[in-house]
Image (tube, rainbow, N blue to C red):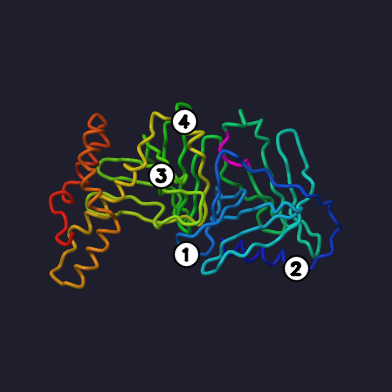
Amino acid sequence: MPIFARKLGAIISAAFLFASVPISAQRLPTTENGFYMMRTNADDLSDYRSVDSMCIGENHDALIAFKSTGDGTVDFFDLKQGEKVVPAKLKLSEPDAGVSQIRHKLIEPGSDEVVLELHFINPGALGNSTKIPMATLSHVNVGQMNFTNLDCMMGKHILYAGIDQDHRVTVMADAEGNLSFLLSSIKEPGVAMNLTGGFWSSGKREEIIFTFIEGSAVTSIKAAPHQRIEYPAWRTANPDGRQYSASPNGFFVADMAKLGSKSNRLPYGLALHFERLEICRHLAGETSGNPERDKQVAESWYNARCDEAKAQHAGYVKQFADNKAVSEILKTHGADFLDRGHGQQ
């Protein structure tokens, strides 16, 4: 992505003299069935902003995003390592509609050069548009680059898609609503974690957590439509500790209240409980006899609401006694935490 961003920045800033393209107060297509969020700063792993659509490269480590301003222009975003996201303002042409797609040109204001051409699939070509999660941006044409098309992740079954500097994550639903998870390596093609049988949860502030259980390991993906998403948004943990953690540079998540299946919905409190078990198990073994250190651990224990987690644990065990996967996780992840507790509580 840094190479892509540098070349594209040069294109935008160059003063070419091209013929003018008609401009109107058009807006780019977006979706009412989900939302896109992009990091505001490469060094802040928890701060995000809303955008209208996003191209998460299927075959490239690129992430570019767009937000209509309503005055015939579009804010174009990319994320360079170590920098804040500063949008470039581009003019938006009239749409060029085809049989099954709509093309929009984004134009550098000073030169009237076409910088990008965005290709959207007509939602009707994919089926019932009320059930299509993502904005239907299929690829981006960058005529001045060595490659012509940047293919974008897009599909009617994708409920979550995110990318960081090393990995790409997707959550998909089949026709029955069953959830699957794929974590793939951008730098090492073929390296992947593939899970099925997932759950989803939603909170009062529209937070969404996807949870996948494999043996004694819990994988979770957190998303929210507001500014702060506590790091890490992606995590995998087993009773021995965390195996993987990261947060995306940008992501899409579906409105699960509209598109989620009730059959695999978990209480939001339980999804948080899995995360607390990991944190509180760690804190339970941190007492050292050093008063200053023990005070810090006790404060962390309080902030993580570990006493509340201990009080709730038996209720979750009873409630999900018939769910083998959930019961096993509660048993294995809660054992040491419940037995040892915390000396400073």
Q: Residue at x 61, y 28 (%)?
A: 128
Question: 328 and 205: which one is in front?
Answer: 205
| Amino acid tagged 3 | Ile
**The residue tagged with tag 1: helix, strand or loop?**
loop
User: Distance of mark 4 from mark 3, alpha carbons?
Assistant: 18 Å
Q: Which residues are magenta?
A: 132-136
Question: 302 and 255: which one is in front?
Answer: 302
User: Distance of mark 1 from mark 3, alpha carbons?
Assistant: 21 Å
Residue 230, picture quadrant? bottom left
**The residue tagged with tag 4: helix, strand or loop?**
loop
| Amino acid tagged 1 | Asp
Residue underneath mark 3:
209
Image side of residue 215 versus residue 125, left or right:
left
Residue underneath mark 4:
174
User: Distance of mark 1 from mark 2, alpha carbons?
Assistant: 30 Å
Q: Position of residue 296 (x, y in %)?
A: 24, 68
Q: Residue at x 48, y 49 (%)?
A: 224
Q: Earlier in the sequence, mark 2 or mark 3?
A: 2
The mark found on residue 87 in the picture is: none
User: Distance of mark 4 from mark 2, alpha carbons?
Assistant: 46 Å
Q: Earlier in the sequence, mark 4 or mark 3?
A: 4
| Amino acid tagged 4 | Asp
Q: Earlier in the sequence, mark 4 or mark 1?
A: 1
Residue underneath mark 2:
14
The mark found on residue 44 in the picture is: 1
Image side of residue 202 versus residue 252, left or right:
left
In the displayed image of the protein, which residue is found farthest to the top? 176
Q: Quadrant of the C terminus?
A: bottom left
